[in-house]
Image (cartoon, grey):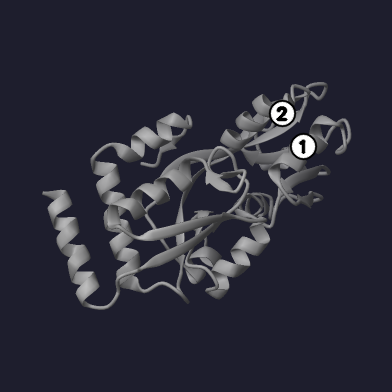
Amino acid sequence: MLIRNLLLAMATLASNGVWAAQLHFVTEEFPPFSYSRGATASGAFPEIVEATCALLQWRCTIEVLPWRRALQQAEEGVVDGIFTVIQSPARQAAFFITPMLVSSGYDFYTQRSSNFQYTQSSDLSGRQVGVYGPSGTSFVLQKSVRRTPNVVIKLVTNNQRLLLMLNAGRFGEEGVVVLNHDVAKHLIEHEYLYAVRQAGYLTSIEYGIGFSRKKVSSAQFQAFNRGLGTLRNNGQLATILQRYGLQPAN
């Protein structure tokens, strides 16, 4: 019944002239959520997008770019969609955002030789904190320390470089960084960064897919959402996330 209703909705969209012949998505190096494998976009979110587009019979392409360039293209309507995105005022102003698909979190990391353990924002007073940004992670960090004095936030261009710098002692013996714990787990295992350790929990976070308000119609966005709903109901979404060790959003 769900498939039949979806096909009827698709036919209605086609007859109304809002059929999307092709959508162009951009993303970043953010494993296991998204990453490049040669010229191909891989990871949980590319699989979700590809499965949804296949269900809708849309032709969709996914390009992996540096985050700042990807975000600029999506905000300006050069491309149709972008992932991963969080629910923030800036993102909501620029994008239609799907229901959240993945639940994750931000943690603190430090060198194993450090005795730092985060329990509250005042623990960061007088410290330099590295974070990938500008990004959703840096937005959350800046919000969490806005009332904590003497916190110096250092923005780094990507998560891999951030952890490599920490592992090499580039932030000093007491250096601290913040990043997504699923990304950290992936990078520590694949880059053998065993000189770093988890040093406290900051907050939970959820991710979805954004569609440019300048490029994508509300009807196209709603059609994509219905496709996502079908993937959720038939268990395909959970299967994809499980394959990458990720948790579905509530």
Q: Nearer the viewer, residue 238 or 38?
A: 38
Q: Position of residue 248 (x, y in %)?
A: 39, 38
Q: Position of residue 26 (x, y in %)?
A: 55, 58
When asked about the image quadrant of residue 180, the answer is top right
Residue bearing mark 2: 191
Query: Crowding at label 1, few (<14), some or many (≥20) Cα neighbours within 10 Å?
Result: many
Q: At x 66% / y 52%, what residue is drawn?
A: 138
Q: Position of residue 227 (x, y in %)?
A: 28, 54
* Left-right relation of 84 to 188: left
Q: Amino acid at mark 2?
A: Glu
* Left-right relation of 138 to 14: right
Q: At x 59% / y 44%, what residue is drawn?
A: 35
Q: Which mark is residue 176?
A: 1
Vertical relation: 117 (above or below) 91: above
Task: Judge depth for marks 2 and 1 and give the one in front.
Answer: 2
Label 2, secondary structure: give it.
helix
Vertical relation: 75 (above or below) 7: below
Which residue, as the protein is rendered here, is positioned at the far left? 1
Which numbered disc flags the more N-terminal residue, 2 or 1?
1
Disc 2 from disc 1: Cα separation: 19 Å
Q: Amino acid at mark 1?
A: Val
Query: Crowding at label 2, few (<14), some or many (≥20) Cα neighbours within 10 Å?
Result: few
Of the 4 image quadrants, the one containing the C terminus is: top left
Q: Which mark is residue 47?
A: none
Which residue, as the protein is rendered here, is positioned at the far front? 39
Q: At x 13% / y 53%, what residue is drawn?
A: 4
* Left-right relation of 220 to 149: left
When asked about the image quadrant of residue 114, the answer is top right
Vertical relation: 233 (above or below) 26: above
Q: At x 76% / y 44%, what residue is drawn?
A: 130
